[in-house]
Image (cartoon, rainbow, N blue to C red):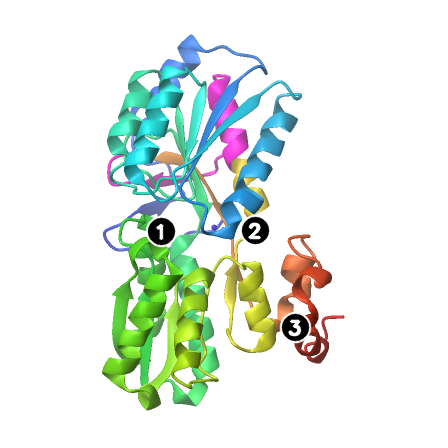
Amino acid sequence: MRRAAFAVAAGAMAVSLAACGSAKESTGGAAKSADSKKKGDAITVGLLLPENQTARYEKFDRPLIEKKVAELTNGKGKVVYANAKQDATLQSQQVDTMITNKVDVLVVDAVDAAAIKNSVQKAHDAGIPVVAYDRLAQGPIDAYTSFDNVTVGKTQGEALLKALGAKAKSGKIVMMNGSSTDPNAGQFKAGAHQVLDGKVNVGKEYDTKEWKPENANSNMEGAISALGKKNIVGVYSANDGMAGGIITALKQAGLSNIPVTGQDAELAGVQRIVAGEQYMSVYKPYAPEAAAAAEMAVSLAQGKSLDSVAKDKVDSPTTKGVPSVLVAVTSLTKDNIKDTVVKDGVYTLADICTAQYKAACDKAGLK
């Protein structure tokens, strides 16, 4: 989604490599779980993911977590899965169901990090530890894994500046941030602003409802109308899905060669990078993030310490010193596709270089 000291997003989360807060604050329900659930390998992990529009969740996160749980439990542990389809109310109901069914631990990627707070509290009260996955959920969570989200935004901003070069202040850029209900979006935005402020002119900036490409498309159409198409020199897009909607709007306005950022290294995004329509994406290796979530979940369910897994500490708005694993990210451009997503087995060259993109792939040396 992703080590050394990390930047702090103003007003959001503070990351500290030294322990902060007491053990009581940082472990919450885990302590209760450790006393009452001396389980072996036959554990049940409840996995709740936020939506299925972004390709990563069904293609990568879910199968990777399921595979790692099986490995760590000698095939005896099982994962019970639910997807909230971008509905925070539905996700709360899914948590209730898993509490009723007495899962041993929950891994939750929150639709709305604040709205999930009461559900996390219910799990805590039931003695079920909670691992916040990818997004820093509020409430008494026991562990957290994600990418260094401020650095993601910085990486995007730096790439956009590089693409703009001497044209950085010759016109306006549009900033298409993610959903305001997603704490990661605020951290991406903060990181990007740290790099871009004072070096570009931001003509329009949006928090895009539900991260939906169609909403980004509509916002981009509005920005083009308000700013004038001749005045737009670049677009900061917080992820690849929105970049697709943005690029469609640019094409419909007759605009080309406008650098657009992205994130997630989705196949469509990688193909747009090969074709020169999108400048970059942020490659977040899902395998280590999923592995960390599975390791923490199994350890918590079995009443074991997280010390050997979680080397960092994170403060959420409600919980201090949450044991955390933060995974590094890479700026993905046309120049390093082979060394990132292809090398790691995320995609093959055949996946990327379909008939539509064969000529562009050949030109980029992707053979």
Residue 40: quarter of image? top right
Q: Give, as a single range, the part of the protein colored magenta.
A: 293-320
Residue kind at label 3, given as amino acid type: Tyr
Report if the CB atoms under discs 3 and 1 are less than 8 Å apart.
no
Residue kind at label 2, given as amino acid type: Pro
What residue is pinned by disc 1?
184
Question: Which numbered mark, 3 or 1, is in the foreground of this view?
Answer: 3
Image: 158 above or below 166: above
Which quadrant holds the C terminus? bottom right
What residue is pinned by disc 2?
285
User: Disc 3 to disc 1, how far (Cα)?
Assistant: 32 Å
Residue 317: quarter of image? top left
What residue is pinned by disc 3?
357
Q: Position of residue 104 (x, y in %)?
A: 45, 18
Residue located at (27% from left, 25% from top): 121
Identify which residue, 88 or 295, lies in the foreground: 88
